[in-house]
């Protein structure tokens, strides 16, 4: 009768798997065993499994540290094995299943799979990283108030690229440490693709801020774009790097997004002075080519500005009452 | 006031020997009606600021500067006002009336007998006439400083006498008399060596007459009315004066043809390594109204900045240009107790009569104690030329809504490309 014995970690991650077709199986640290375990807390002759024609029975061989069903303290003495039982011997866990044991449903390739496959391709990876480096360099160039030559941009561009590589590398390292496949190229490819999408969202936000007046109520919606992008990135990172349920993956991604944006929001909030004597306004301007909305006239502007006076009076009255 | 309130500043003194004799005579005669005015912090019992004052009626009315007793006017529970006379007697003073625009205040001391007092002059002095400024600089004791009357300060909106003589810290609120010992002005500010400013005596006469006719019920209400009247007078004068078009390189900007708005200019033409050429013209009212040491109002500034890219891409030019307009600040000092935070609106605006298309930003904050008054800030940045830009900006402190909007409209419609 065939039997499958799996060595699993305390987090129930598979370490090794053995399929045997014998009616008596010996497990222990000694080399005479069918399954040899290196855990020093296991005795040389630890367990014996026998098939009596109907059931598999498991028996402890009188060991020093004993053998137990995972969830109890009951010692094993001719215990009848059920498929899927987990046993604790020494500091190790063994899971025993029979060939007819049901397996989880096949996981569909995600809709992102194609995207992931394209992005992890070395050519695409090189392309995304160069786009990222180019944009970073261009922003450094724009911000410099004096003339600068190419080599002056090199250091900040390389620095920024390395800094941003830290995230996918970190995720890959985490996967590796948790006994998953590191898939570092895939993580890099996906992350840089999203970093570039974040640049694009920056440009979209600027165009919106530039074109629309402060009356336009949807401006704030556009600031959700980077949050949505970050969520997608975190979701893909965990999709690539870790096996987990769909629900758990969403919870983790939402958690990371909240931590990232909520954290930076809190930092901003705590740095905000109680009273600011300076006006806070939106000063986004872009070259004339980005302007596509018609201009207001002075009447409209004066009418809109007039509303601010009541708002300011209310703000003044409120603070006094507190 | 670009000069400093006399409370703060130190200036050296020099007195000629002839003047000393005359001055001594005047001083002896007037000393009983001269006081040091002290603001006493109730909690610590110590003086928190000092100034001078002089009696102008037999029943104990004493004139001084508003800024000497402003602490009390704003926080009557924190301070009390006290006088110290030439014999060292002290007693409490009661605030009667103020004129924040001309920085004057009337306080009253208790007296049972008719007391000697300063006479206010009937007419203004002649240019060059010798005057004597009295006061207690730096708590050193009463002194007399001779000087010369040099007429009214030409570019002031609210009249100030230009006095050539040392007005020192602590002399604020002291009288300035002619040789007949009649008051012709009140010490108020200094602008460095031998340049002092006085409030003309007619302002004091007006305040005193109004006080005798009708004693104000609330100082806050009185201040509120004075600020409203002053901004009305100022903005009406500005809107009714000729607005002349002036070239700023390729842009047309307005200048208001009134003496009290003065303009200055600068450019970076001397900096050959600059990435863009910049020329700035700024105009402002050289005075403001002191309400407390951290709350000033009544000021106006206008600034125009023309930028032109040299060998720059339009993208980079606009990027640097954006940095130029990010940090507009209000023209007056005000604290959390005085004003709300700014509320702002922005839009792309093209006046019907002009060719320029700009991103325009309007911000305002309301006064907490004077709900009809606001500080406003306007900033507009042209966005219709790839390599040229014009930033137009103004701030007005302590203005009513209708005046603020009327000024904004006129300002917006006066700017264009050549």
Image (cartoon, helix red, strand yellow):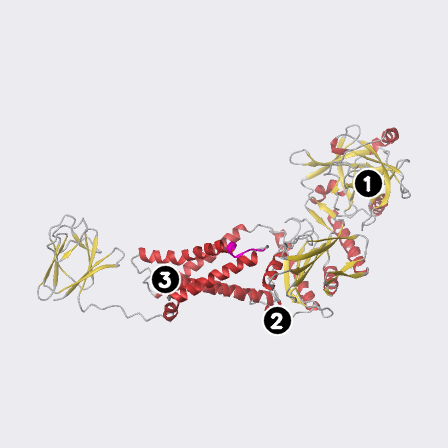
Which residue is identified by label 3?
Answer: A185
Q: Is residue A187 left or right of residue B265?
A: left
> What number of labels is visible?
3
Q: Residues within 10 Å of mark 3 (few under 14, many from 20)?
A: some
SS for tag 1? strand
Q: Is residue A242 visible?
A: yes
Left/right placement of residue A32 relative to residue B356 reads: left
Magenta-span inclusion, residue A151: yes
Question: For the residues carrying marks 3 and 2, which lies nearer the camera in this image?
Answer: 3
The answer as to whether the residues below labels 1 and 3 share one chain is no
Q: Image quadrant of residue B162?
A: top right
The residue depicted at 73 percent of the width and 48 percent of the height is B220
Q: According to the image, label 2 marks what residue?
A: A293
- Which of disc 2 and disc 3 is earlier in sequence? 3
Q: Nearer the viewer, residue B320 or B162?
A: B320
Q: Quadrant of the C terminus of chain B?
A: bottom right
Label 1 to label 3, Cα distance in Å? 81 Å
**Chain ID for label 2?**
A
Q: Residues within 10 Å of mark 2 (few under 14, many from 20)?
A: few
Magenta-drawn segment:
A147-152
Q: Which x, y percent locates residue B4?
A: 74, 42
Label for residue A149?
Answer: none
* Vertical position of residue A136 compared to residue A288: above or below: above
Magenta stretch containing residue B94, yes or no? Answer: no
């Amino acid at each position: 009768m065939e039997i499958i014995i799996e060595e699993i970690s305390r987090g129930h991650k598979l370490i090794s798997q053995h399929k045997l077709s014998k009616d008596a199986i010996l497990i222990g640290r000694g080399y005479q065993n069918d399954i040899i375990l290196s855990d020093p807390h296991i005795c040389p002759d630890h367990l014996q499994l026998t098939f009596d024609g109907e059931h598999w029975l498991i028996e402890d061989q009188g060991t020093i540290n004993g053998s137990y069903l995972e969830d109890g303290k009951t010692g094993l003495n001719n215990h009848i094995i059920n498929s899927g039982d987990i046993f604790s011997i020494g500091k190790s866990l063994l899971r025993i299943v029979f060939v007819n044991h049901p397996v989880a449903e096949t996981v569909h390739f995600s809709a992102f799979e194609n995207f992931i496959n394209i992005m992890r391709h070395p050519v695409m990876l090189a392309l995304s990283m160069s786009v990222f480096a180019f944009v970073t360099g261009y922003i450094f160039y724009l911000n410099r108030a004096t003339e600068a030559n190419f080599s002056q941009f090199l250091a900040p561009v390389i620095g920024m690229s390395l800094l941003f590589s830290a995230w996918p590398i970190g995720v890959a390292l985490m996967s590796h440490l948790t006994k998953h496949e590191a898939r570092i190229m895939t993580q890099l490819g996906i992350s840089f693709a999203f970093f570039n999408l974040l640049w694009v969202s920056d440009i979209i936000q600027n165009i919106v801020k530039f074109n629309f007046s402060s009356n336009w109520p949807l401006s704030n919606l556009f600031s959700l774009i980077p949050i949505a992008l970050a969520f997608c990135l975190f979701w893909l990172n965990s999709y690539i790097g870790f096996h987990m349920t769909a629900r758990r993956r969403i919870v983790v991604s939402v958690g990371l997004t909240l931590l990232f944006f909520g954290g930076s929001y809190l930092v901003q909030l705590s740095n905000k002075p109680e009273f600011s004597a300076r006006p806070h306004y939106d000063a986004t301007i872009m070259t004339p080519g980005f302007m596509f909305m018609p201009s207001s006239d002075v009447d409209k502007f004066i009418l809109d500005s007039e509303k601010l006076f009541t708002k300011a009076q209310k703000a003044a009255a409120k603070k006094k009452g507190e | 006031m670009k000069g400093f309130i006399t409370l703060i500043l130190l200036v050296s003194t020099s007195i000629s020997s002839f003047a000393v004799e005359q001055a001594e005579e005047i001083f002896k005669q007037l000393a009983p009606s001269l006081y040091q005015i002290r603001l006493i912090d109730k909690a610590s019992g110590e003086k928190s600021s000092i100034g001078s004052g002089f009696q102008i009626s037999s029943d104990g009315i004493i004139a001084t500067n508003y800024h000497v007793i402003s602490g009390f006017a704003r926080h009557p529970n924190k301070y009390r006002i006290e006088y110290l006379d030439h014999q060292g007697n002290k007693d409490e003073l009661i605030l009667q009336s103020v004129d924040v625009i001309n920085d004057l205040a009337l306080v009253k001391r208790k007296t049972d007998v008719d007391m000697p007092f300063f006479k206010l002059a009937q007419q203004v002095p002649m240019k060059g006439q010798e005057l004597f400024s009295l006061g207690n600089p730096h708590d050193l004791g009463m002194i007399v400083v001779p000087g010369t009357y040099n007429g009214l300060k030409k570019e002031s909106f609210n009249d100030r006498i230009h006095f050539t003589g040392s007005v020192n810290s602590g002399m604020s609120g002291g009288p300035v008399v002619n040789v007949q010992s009649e008051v012709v002005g009140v010490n108020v500010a200094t602008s460095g060596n031998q340049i002092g400013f006085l409030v003309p005596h007619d302002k004091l006469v007006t305040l005193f007459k109004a006080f005798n006719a009708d004693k104000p019920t609330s100082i806050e209400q009185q201040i509120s009315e004075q600020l409203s009247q002053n901004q009305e007078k100022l903005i009406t004068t500005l809107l009714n004066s000729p607005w002349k078009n002036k070239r700023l390189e390729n842009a047309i900007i307005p200048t208001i043809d009134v003496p009290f708005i003065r303009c200055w200019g600068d450019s970076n033409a001397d900096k050959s390594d600059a990435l863009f050429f910049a020329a700035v013209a700024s105009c402002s009212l050289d005075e403001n109204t002191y309400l407390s040491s951290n709350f000033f109002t009544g000021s106006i500034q206008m600034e125009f900045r023309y930028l032109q890219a040299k060998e720059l891409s339009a993208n980079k030019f606009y990027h640097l240009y954006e940095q130029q307009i990010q940090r507009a600040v209000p023209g007056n000092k005000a604290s959390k107790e005085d004003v709300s935070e700014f509320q702002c609106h922005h839009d792309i605006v093209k006046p019907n009569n002009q060719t320029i298309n700009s991103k325009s930003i309007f911000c305002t904050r309301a006064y907490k104690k004077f709900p009809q008054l606001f500080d406003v800030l306007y900033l507009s940045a042209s966005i219709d030329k790839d390599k040229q830009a014009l930033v137009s900006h103004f701030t007005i402190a302590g203005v009513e809504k209708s005046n603020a909007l009327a000024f904004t409209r006129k300002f917006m419609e006066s700017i264009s490309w050549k």
